[in-house]
Amino acid sequence: MSRLLQRIEYSSGQRRRYGRRCRRPNNNSMMKELLWFSLSASLSASVQSFHLSPFQQAMPPLSTHPLHSKASSRKGRRGFGLGHPTSKKVSYPPIHLDEVDDDIDSQIFPLQDDLEQQLSTYTTANHNNNNNINAGARVSEFLSNIPRVLSPPPLVSSTQEWRKLQRHAAQTIKSTHLRELLQDPVRCDAMFAEHDGVYFDYSRQQVTLETMDLLFDLAEKQELTKRIQAMVNGEKINFTEDRAVLHTALRASKDKIGTVFVDDEDAIKEVHDVLDQIKQFTEAFRSGHITGYTGKRMRNIVSVGIGGSYLGPEFLHEVLKTEEEGISSSLGYSLRFLANVDPVDVERTCADLDPEETLIIIVSKTFTTAETMLNARTMRQWLWDFMGDDIDVVKKHVVACSSVSATENVKAFGIDTDKYFFRFWDWVGGRYSVCGAAGAVPISLLYGFDLFEKFLEGARSMDEHFINAPMRQNIPILMGLLGVWNSSFMGYNSRALIPYAQALLRLPAHIQQLDMESNGKRISRHGIEIDYPVGEVDFGEPGTNSQHSFFQLIHQGQTIPVDFLGFVQSQHDILIDGEKLSSHDELMSNFFAQPDALANGKTADEVRAEGCAEDLILHKVFDGNRPSSSLLFPQLSAYVTGQILSLYEHRTAVQGFIWDLNSFDQWGVELGKKLAIDVKDHLTKARYDPKQQPVDIPDAPATSRILNYYVKNGREATENGIGVSVNPLTSVTRKTYREHIPPPIHDLGGNVGKLS
Ligand SMILES: O=P(O)(O)OC[C@H]1O[C@](O)(CO)[C@@H](O)[C@@H]1O
């Protein structure tokens, strides 16, 4: 096999996917696919190198072969080949890979041997013209058999399971109103699942028991359980980056050490080594053993990072801010996030901070992200402006949370990589990293390590449920299947996440990145352009604020499935004199009322019965039939936040598995990064070299025009005449800080947060 692979000339996409670094996969379907590539590429390479005119007579032209990729895909590259059917227009042969027995070796390797034999026969025959036709015919016959066994799997949309769901949606569900479905007590009782205090009710989704059966069949067909296992066992399912996907290892307990390995490294042991390091650092920081450059205790924390290196930690911070233990443990400390490269975000972040008391955390997996690195340099300059241009200022005031492979860059920045560097690994995607150092360092420094551990415990509880619970009771699987149903079968391409908890105000933003970066894709994991809708627009705001904002559209405009999140108890309930219900009860009344309003709507007769004027009736009618799920949790704590995080991470994974996507890469974001680099080049020239004006970007007249407008109108007269508008870096901040009158000293009598 490897011998064959090595002499294959891959097209560029195939090389990335199955290049020489690729080990023999232990997944049979991938193995089959690999063989498919190898045989087709090998055969075509051989055919080409022998210049076989008899072949060409005996065989149908390769370009008309059903498995031939778009004719142009190999032109001008390395000859021709069968290629991969990248086009959805390719018609597949009747027998598919997944119909082949799992005993791959016994089926494929004889074929491979046969192929080699055929080619060698031909090589010999080629020297003897009389045999050409026979050899050609034999190879041709062999070739025509290859697709019967080695074609790649079809798109999920062409499976029977998918088609049944399509028919079911069109013939049954789209003509059934939720109002009717909600009258069926058996159905309603069945559409409920519970785990460790989490109550999930999906009876207001536009589904019947039959729908769910069909969805479970689809999940079986897509080998969902097997794929979940592959993920949590550390298989490299993020194949475009050749990485495992192990955010579950970030919260695995110590007794799981020795159970998950990536490239022979014990992943869970690595995780606990770093957690121990963070715990020790936290204790030293919070007890005052670690001080700043001028000897002052540090109590302000600024976390610099963007995307997944920011949204998760910020969402968790917002929850803990008002959590009972969080309030007391954070007394005397502050935590802020700096994400946007907008200089105003710098100003907002450090306006009233004393740099001598401030620790900067740079959170960047790659340690190269342009926005984060500029903000990191800016914050370093801010420290230097106040305390002097000394590298020890950086050593005392800056820590890094980054991947092991970025160690040299971290060191070059001036950070003490022995003590002030907390690593994570390639097998943690940025948007899945809040349980690693990215979240652990800022959150533990502010709230103490114990509270962060509770968050990990909650996530672990939901992970275990996800891995072990049967599908019908498995909350993340149910949520994922309903996501697929709503998006791919019901045609709803947005969904809202409405937490009835102000402390979850940043949850929607985090889930938005998590899900949209994961499942906003167009190519299946088999390298085929998909022909079914995937990915949703995720958005949300806390209820009831959202009701007074975009709920008009949800009630009477488009149909947008909603997840309602509510809590049995508030973090801080209030019942003032004269009120019958507490404020939390008032809030939760909305949580209970909205799903029914969306599902049932209001008919014209009901509106009329309320005494509405005839000409207004239609305006006040609500069609209803709008789906939602309700999730009820005990109280918003660190533990429950871990559960919520894990729920949504796994919902995304489930949808990606069903849709046959790689949910763990993000090539789309790379384009934006490259484009910004080009523009920066032009802008730099325009700013510093008047001869380069006006800007003229080839083939981009509109961009050139607006860029010129920006350059021309943004100028301020400067001494050197270049016309660059620059503020001294920290002048605004310095002034604000100096003039700032600090609030009265807090009561620092909190637990570990006590300052001496
Ligand atoms: O942690 P890094 O490497 O700075 O990347 C930040 C973010 O940028 C992205 O790559 C793209 O936005 C995210 O996936 C990631 O969370």
Image (tube, rainbow, N blue to C red):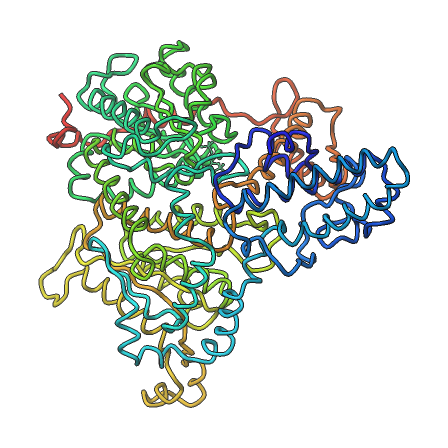
Image height of 219 relative to 212, above or below? above
Q: Position of residue 152 (x, y in %)?
A: 61, 50
Residue 46 image-quadrant placement: top right
For the image shown, how many numbered marks are present on the structure? 0
Residue 532 in view, yes or no: yes
- Residue at 60% x, 31% y: name it: 2
Image height of 341 relative to 756, above or below? below
Image height of 417 relative to 638, above or below? above
- Position of 34 with respect to 186 (left or right) is right
- Position of 564 with respect to 515 (left or right) is left
Q: Position of residue 14 (x, y in %)?
A: 64, 38
Q: Nearer the viewer, residue 648 or 444?
A: 648
Q: Nearer the viewer, residue 352 or 608?
A: 608
Q: Position of residue 320 (x, y in %)?
A: 24, 42
Q: Nearer the viewer, residue 235 or 39?
A: 39
- Residue at 39% x, 65% y: name it: 551
Of the 4 image quadrants, the one containing the C terminus is top left
Outermost left residue: 577
Of the 4 image quadrants, the one containing the N terminus is top right
Image height of 602 relative to 694, above or below? below
- Position of 472 with respect to 376 (left or right) is left
- Residue at 85% x, 39% y: name it: 52
Outermost right residue: 129
Residue 441 in view, yes or no: no
Q: Position of residue 524 (x, y in %)?
A: 57, 50
- Residue at 45% x, 84% y: name it: 618
Q: Nearer the viewer, residue 140 or 675?
A: 140
Residue 454 image-quadrant placement: top left
- Position of 749 with respect to 46 (left or right) is left
